[in-house]
Image (cartoon, rainbow, N blue to C red):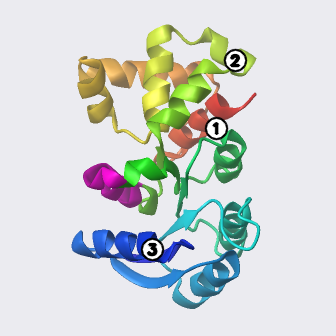
Amino acid sequence: MRVVIAEDLALLRDGLTRMLEDNGFEVVAGVEDGEGLIEAVERERPDVCVVDVRLPPTFRDEGIRAALEARRRVPGLPVLVLSQYVERVFAKELLADGSGGVGYLLKDRVAEIGDFVDAVRRVAAGGTAMDPEVVAQLVAGRGPARLEELTPRERDVLGLMAEGRSNQAIAAKLVVTEGAVEKHVSNIFGKLMLPPSEGDHRRVLAVLAWLGE
């Protein structure tokens, strides 16, 4: 699996490279700014990108803007962004096209190697990977009116879906059967009026609805 990394701090960029290569990935480019990311994406056509939200020159939102532009130029390009803090608007922008293949993790999560590597793989496969802290802050906020129909347990399931967990992993986390999770997921789709679709597209749309205001 081929990866492009966009991170301005050389030590962190090198650390991410070693970590991913030790787990079977091929890092085909490591860049330090948004322009370099776009050039590397167009040149290498990677399977997934790992991008810092804040890149030179202003360290505001260059990383996320470059990631969105890269996805515009290469539709469906999987992108996992790293951020020092929870920045809700960035998470929503990443998910805005509803196509999946996106993730948003806090940089502290990188230290949990297994979870980080799993998140990269999930995103590369077209799924989502939202940091649990991002999920917690969004749950605490006010959701869209249609989410009010969800039961507390259905909200728990939807929050874990946002983290990118499978039905099996959700069942283990909530200590319920996988069948019970499947029923909750079906109820969520019904209440959010999401029609049947191929693959995990409805899961992405459900997370989008949950992120909305």
- Mark 2 lies on a secondary structure that is helix
- Mark pair 2, 3: CA separation: 41 Å
Left or right for 127, reference 18: right
Q: Report which residue position mark 3 lands on.
A: 13
Q: Position of residue 204 (x, y in %)?
A: 56, 42
Disc 1 is placed on an element classified as helix
- Examine the rendered structure and indicate whether residue 204 appears above or below residue 136: below
Q: Amino acid at mark 3?
A: Arg
Point out the frontmost of discs 2 and 3. Answer: 3
Q: Would you name the residue on which mark 1 appears?
A: 208
Residue depicted at 28% across the width and 55% down the height: 113
Q: Decide if residue 88 is on the left or right side of residue 78.
A: right
User: Residue 211's x, y, as percent?
Assistant: 65, 33
**Region in magenta:** 111-122
The amino acid pointed to by label 2 is Arg
Query: Looking at the image, which is closer to me, 83 or 50?
Result: 83
Q: Magenta stretch: residue 118 in it?
A: yes
Viewer-proximal residue among 187 and 33 = 33
Q: Quadrant of residue 68?
A: bottom right
Picture quarter with the C terminus: top right
User: Which residue is more in the foreground, 206 or 110?
Assistant: 110
Compared to 58, does 139 lie above or below?
Answer: above
Q: How busy is the neighbourhood of tag 1: few (under 14 within 10 Å), some, or many (20 plus)?
A: many
- Which residue bears the numbered disc 2? 146
Task: Identify which amino acid the numbered label 1 is placed on.
Answer: Leu
Q: Residue at x 42, y 30 (%)?
A: 160
